[in-house]
Image (cartoon, rainbow, N blue to C red):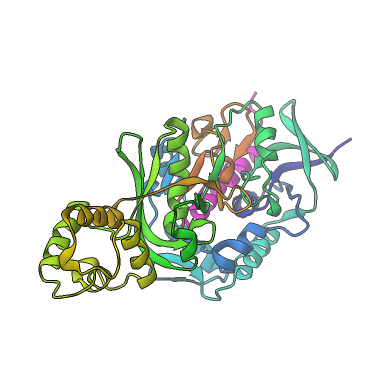
Amino acid sequence: MPERADIVVVGTGAAGLMAAIWAGRTAQKQASGLRIVALDSAKRIGAKILVAGGGRCNVTHHTVSEKDYAAGPGSSLNAVKNVLRAFPVESTTRFFAELGVELKREETGKLFPVSDDAHTVLDALLRAARDAGVELVYPWRVESIVAEGEGFVVCGTGGEISCARLIVATGGKSLPKTGSDGHGLEVVKGLGHSVTRTFPALVPLIVEKAGSFIPGLSGIAHVSEVIVASSTGKRLASFTDSLLCTHFGLSGPAALDISRYLTAARHADPGAGLLVNWLPGRTFYEVDAALVGATAGAAGRTVLRMVLEYPAFGASMPERLARALVESAGVECAMSAAHLSREARRMLARALTAMPVAITGDRGYFFAEVTAGGVPLSEVRLESMESRAQPGLHLCGEILDIDGRIGGFNFQWAWASGYLAGVGAARSAAAPPQS
């Protein structure tokens, strides 16, 4: 006979630990005596938490709304809003404060532990889980789950365990070395759910090296606007943040945020592409007009010095980047700005504000911070994250078809959806059977 538990949580990342903690706390409050077991395939759990934010763990963001997320088919932003409202940022900061983890707000709005150490966050979550009576069992890889009677039988490397309520928080496919290999998506498909197309999100972009100066500027970062444009030139999405040139292409917050929108756009429109505005907030026409004024008063200045020194362009652009942009427009950096032709001026304005960048792909799941795609939110009951396809099954975290931009938003989704799944599962498990 399989071992027995009331609630089994599969996956102990951020969402899984949150679900386990709140299932345990709810059971304790109800004095229901529920047995809660959390399983994970990793030898050391919480690996994604430890690598997040460069090892500091960006717990959440100061301000979070549904507009910070992308929703696939069947996952409306209004549904995201309802989940976030159940456990907002204020609840997250209070929750961690109660665990002894004080958070600090940085200029970007990101909230980190004052220790600047992700271990502080993970250790607090593990203590909270144990204090809530949760049994953490690992490494214990789940190989299959079968719905049986009014519950489930979970089969894996540790044998079998049956339960009345099941919470699946196995994540997507990003950073597979931490245990997120996509197997959980296949498991929930076997339990009656659909899974939308999955692809890497918050992932660095690979640039076509032939004819591109970007790989040669590896290490240079500049605040820029990145834009996804359709094959007809329509703007589909844009982000303004630090953009980092690398030996392979583009990284940094701006590139990571735009990556999922570029991939999605190209799936529907293969001609969609990426543009970079190196002077965010300024249009082609504004820069062209500024160049007219700058050339009129150039007084022997070179084109490069004009770009670097003229106030309209800002003095913060790295000289190597400015030089590369001028040259990409077919203009000699040493040319007198007063001799800049109308055609050359317009080419330069275009290079500065709407430079096409040939993206050949991305660095894949091994470097992606999250997975786009998953189970549509329309297939779960938002008040408890319980499956509409399989009663007794609750889903939370990255396995759902929701992904947020960089800055702590995906963690906030994990805390909120995990909270709802844990409370919902415990309340249902403790409820008397209906006749």
Most extreme residue toward the top is: 435
Q: Is residue 197 above or below residue 366?
A: above
Q: Residue at x 46, y 65 (%)?
A: 217
Residue 385 coordinates in the image, percent (x, y): 55, 38
For residue 102, side relative to residue 348 (left or right): right
Query: Which residue is more in the foreground, 349 or 186?
Result: 349
Q: Residue at x 61, y 28 (%)?
A: 193
Q: Is residue 155 above or below residue 126?
A: above
In the rendered structure, which segment of residues is drawn in magenta?
Answer: 407-435
Residue 293 coordinates in the image, percent (x, y): 11, 64
Q: Is residue 59 visible?
A: yes
The magenta stretch spans residue 173 = no
Q: Is residue 278 above or below residue 103?
A: above
Q: Residue at x 48, y 40 (%)?
A: 263
For residue 80, side relative to residue 2 (left or right): left
Q: Residue at x 76, y 49 (%)?
A: 41
Q: How many numbered dots are placed on residues in this image?
A: 0
Q: Is residue 152 above or below residue 116?
A: above
Query: Which residue is more in the foreground, 147 or 283?
Result: 283
Image quadrant holding the N terminus, namely: top right
Q: Is residue 88 visible?
A: no
Image quadrant holding the C terminus, namely: top right
- Please tell me in which quadrant of the rendered image residue 200 appears: top right
